Image (cartoon, rainbow, N blue to C red):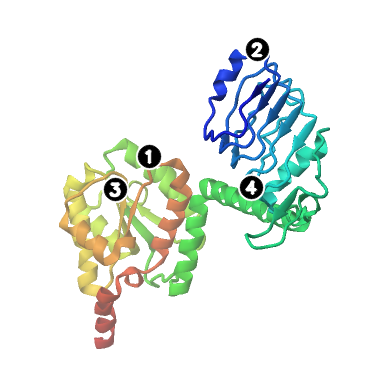
Amino acid sequence: MLVISHNKLSDFNWTKLEHFNQLEILDLSYNKLAVVKTFISRSLKLLNLAHNQIAQLSNGFLEDAPSLKILFLNDNKLVVINQTTFLTQPYNNLETLSLHNNPFQCSCDALDFILWIEDSNVTIPGLATYVDCYTSVNSKPQVMILFDFDQCVNDTLALLISILTSTFIIVTTSMATVAHIFYWDASYVLHYLKAKWKGYGSSASPGSVYDVFVTYDTKDPWVSEWVLEKLRVKLEDEGDKALPLCLEERDWPPGTPLIDNLTHSIRCSRKTLFVLTQAYAKTGVFRLAMYLAHQRLLDENLDVILVLMLEPALQHSHFLRLRRRLCGESIVEWPRTAAAEPWFWQNLRNVVRVDNQTMYTSTYSQYFTGSQERE
């Protein structure tokens, strides 16, 4: 037995208890202890900490005191006791626990401790009469075990929160999945609705024999194969309400001079699509076709130029920079990822069907409106 009561101890070296191998009773009552830390004592059976200033108990502080049967914590300043403070068997073998005259709070934080009391066999003297709690500083005390804890476990509220949380998780996950898998489809729908809202529509010239004249590098076998096997199929076979394409390797009559074929193809096509590669941008055929396409703008007030950037060519071209600023939608780029190809083809079909004038910026589009009014 070790009695150190009625002193003015404000601290106690709990780690030294492991050296008292036969200590069974420790009385530290009527001191000024504020914190009880975890300690090791295999022999201790009774611990008296009554009439101190204890406001905090370490979690599981009795874990290494398996023989402790009686614990006095009455007349202290305990506000809340968590469930982890007193562990269940076999870590905790308490039989008597004195807790009266502590300023416990009547809050949901005390619910865990009440559940621990119900699950354990510990005896708490005066539990139904003297172990009180307070809802506020100046409120009257009420018995802790009679506090209405139903407000802490509201089944309806818990169900509502669970439903809202589950719905939020499911919606967020679904949106992320859909955005990842169907990003380009959603982009197409948005562009389609935007075009409808702006009043875009197909406007084919009655004098056009072809819908689009495609000019490209016929000397590059890869480009030729891409135009004939992919571009032609996507715009002619899969496109709806589309006029045929004019392709040099398929539709030009043999023996006709180049200038005549280019002039006829551009004049008889509603649009002229330049499939740009680095090699083709340096050829004279490209410059001549671009000149003839611009000539239609001067003669007929019709902008028929479309640019498909199959490779990053003419990056420092003043023409392309001006083109992007005035009519950026008339320049399309081959996507770098396969997932974007469906959106690319649909976007290209839309650009082919819509007159370039409707795609110009509001400032420059006044040029066409003013010209038509003067005519």
Circle 2 or circle 3, nearest the eye: 2
Mark 2 falls on what kind of element?
Answer: loop
Which circle's residue, 2 or 3, is located before the other in the chain? Answer: 2
User: Residue at label 3?
Assistant: 216
In the rendering, which numbered label is found on residue 79? Answer: 4
In the rendering, which numbered label is found on residue 21? Answer: 2
- Residue type at tag 4: Val
Which circle's residue, 4 or 1, is located before the other in the chain? Answer: 4
Question: Which residue lies at the image location 64% right of the left edge and 63% below the top edge?
Answer: 138
Other residues around mark 4 within 10 Å, as few (<14) / some (14–19) / many (≥20): some
Q: Nearer the viewer, residue 68 or 107?
A: 68
CA gap, disc 4 to disc 2?
33 Å
Circle 4 or circle 1, nearest the eye: 4
User: On the image, which quarter does residue 227 sit in?
Assistant: top left
Which circle's residue, 3 or 4, is located before the other in the chain? Answer: 4
CA gap, disc 3 to disc 4?
83 Å
CA gap, disc 1 to disc 2?
92 Å
CA gap, disc 4 to disc 1?
82 Å
Mark 4 falls on what kind of element?
Answer: loop
In the rendering, which numbered label is found on residue 225? Answer: 1
Task: Indicate the quadrant containing the C terminus: top left, top right, bottom left or bottom right.
Answer: bottom left
Q: Nearer the viewer, residue 323 or 104?
A: 104
Numbered label tally: 4
Mark 3 falls on what kind of element?
Answer: loop
